[in-house]
Image (cartoon, grey):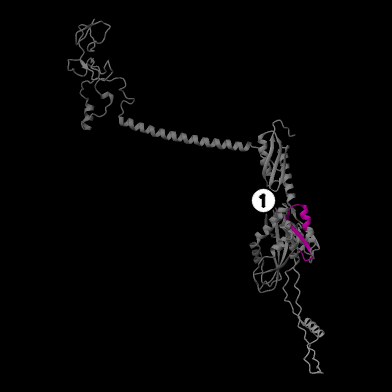
Amino acid sequence: MKNCPHCGRSYSDSDIFCEADGSKLTAPGAPRAASATGPAPDGGAIACPNCGGQAEPGEVICNYCGTRLEAGAEAPSPAAATRMAQSGGAEPWAPPSERGGPREFGDESPYPENPPEADEVASASWRLAGFFGYSLAALIALAAGVWLAIHLSGRHVRETPVAQTSPAARPATQEPSVTLAQIPPVTVRGADLAGVAQRDPASARAVFAANRDALLDTYKRALEGDAGLRDGMLVRVRVRPDGSVNGGAVLVSTTPNPSLDAEVVAAIGGWKFPVESGGAAEIDYPLIFATGPGDIGALETDLGTQLAARTPGATPEYASAPAPTPVAAVTPPARPVVMATPRPVVMATPTAPRGPSRAELERRRRRERASAPRPSRPPAPPLRDRVTASLRGDRRFGRVRAYTSPSGLVTLTGMVFDDKAKLAAARAVGNVSGVTSVVNDLTTETSQWAANQAAIQQALQTAGLTGVTAKVIGRSCYLDGTVKREFDRERAVTIAMGAAPVKVASNLIRVNPGFFGW
């Protein structure tokens, strides 16, 4: 049997708290527990400020609602009193070992001897370290993603099959050039070198350097018709004292080509040299036309061999006629007019005077015509002008260029549409008066189309696309046929554009998975 220490009610031994005031039940004759927080106003019981329940002295948690109960403050420890004095009377933080009063679960700090300020500093340090850690992890992840993307893209490029073009269809990677050979060197003849410094080899090389680009353009046009054209030639130029070119000739070359010789001599004919007071001079230029640096040494050697085998006074390989010197027209002196002495007229009868007879008037007119100065006949135009006029009369020959020689040889270069137009151009030039022979070096568009079409077809066969056919018209390519996969259909376009300078205008290739191209 237990009793309530406040109201005196009796309860069984299994009860713990009083139902009336919530006091803890005690056995009869047991001493009352002293309050840990000091005596309560009612002699020992503590009332909960939230629900009003009674609690035993020393309890800090209400057994009914869980509210923390107010208890009498204990005297602070000496260390706590010292800290309060330093903080101006406010109770600062103290470790749990120096705190008075009861403690419940959760009162202990993970770091019991550290003040809150230290916890805040530690928390800020951990947050800063976490920020840098997350940033570093993000950068590492970004770098790994970039590396993976590059690796996968590179792998994709390596795995993509590349069409292998034939050596003939592969574009040249070397750059053509026009240079002066070292052996033999540039030579100047016929000028008074002691008194005229302008006609020395150094000034001749300077004139070549100033006009190198024009020669290079001429060589590039020649390469359009023959991609493997390489040549070394010795060009002799006649220069007047006023610096103009009076004519030129190709003495010898490693690869005889009348068309290239004519174009080179015509280009040099427009050069301008320094003016000098001496006589005319002849300058020998050893020119090297190479498709790449590796060809220059072999061409120089071949040119030196050709010059060593040439006999003095040999006929040049190609020569142009010097510009004609204009000659003033000579007017023949007027013939003296002899006037006939008029015969005396005997007047038989005093009649009116008669005029000259019709026969006399006719004789006078004849004498006047005979004595009048005859106009000089204009000179005939040069052969090149007559040939050019004949070509310009037909629209098909708008891209044709003609070069003439003193012997009447005409060289035709450029491009026409087909073989029919090529033969027509040769016939038109052959009918010009003064033309002895025609060298027809014209190229045709249809032949270039056929060459591009053959190159594309060969590339497709090499790549295994035997069921695909190509048709080239101009710069457009038309594909047709059958392949097994969609990938092969797209690959045929890449192969065609890589084998020749064309653009695929139509792709009619059909995809048939059951197709066997072999």
Q: Residue at x 73, y 34 (%)?
A: 517
Q: Regarding mark 1 in the picture, which secondary structure is present there? A: loop
Which of the pair 413/305 is nearer the observer?
413
Q: Amino acid at mark 1?
A: Gln
Residue 406 magenta: yes
Check the image and report above or below for 35 versus 367: above
Asked which quadrant contains residue 438, the reply is bottom right
Residues in magenta? 404-425
Q: Estimate how packed mark 1 is, as few (under 14), some (14 to 19) or many (20 or more) residues with alpha carbons within 10 Å.
A: few
Q: Position of residue 315 (x, y in %)?
A: 79, 65
Residue 497 sits above or below residue 338 on the image = above
Residue 83 lies in the magenta stretch: no
Position of the N terminus by quadrant: top left
Q: Is residue 166 in view?
A: no
User: How many numbered marks does the figure carry?
Assistant: 1
Expressed as whole percent of the image width and height from the top left, the position of residue 42 reads 17, 15
Q: Is residue 16 visible?
A: yes
Relative image position of residue 26 (x, y in whole percent): 23, 9
295 horizontally vs 350: left or right: left
Residue 261 place in picture, x, y as percent: 74, 60
Quadrant occupied by the C terminus: top right
- Mark 1 = which residue? 174
Q: Quadrant of residue 115?
A: top left
Viewer-proximal residue among 429 and 158: 429
Residue at horizontal 71 percent and vertical 36 percent from the top: 482
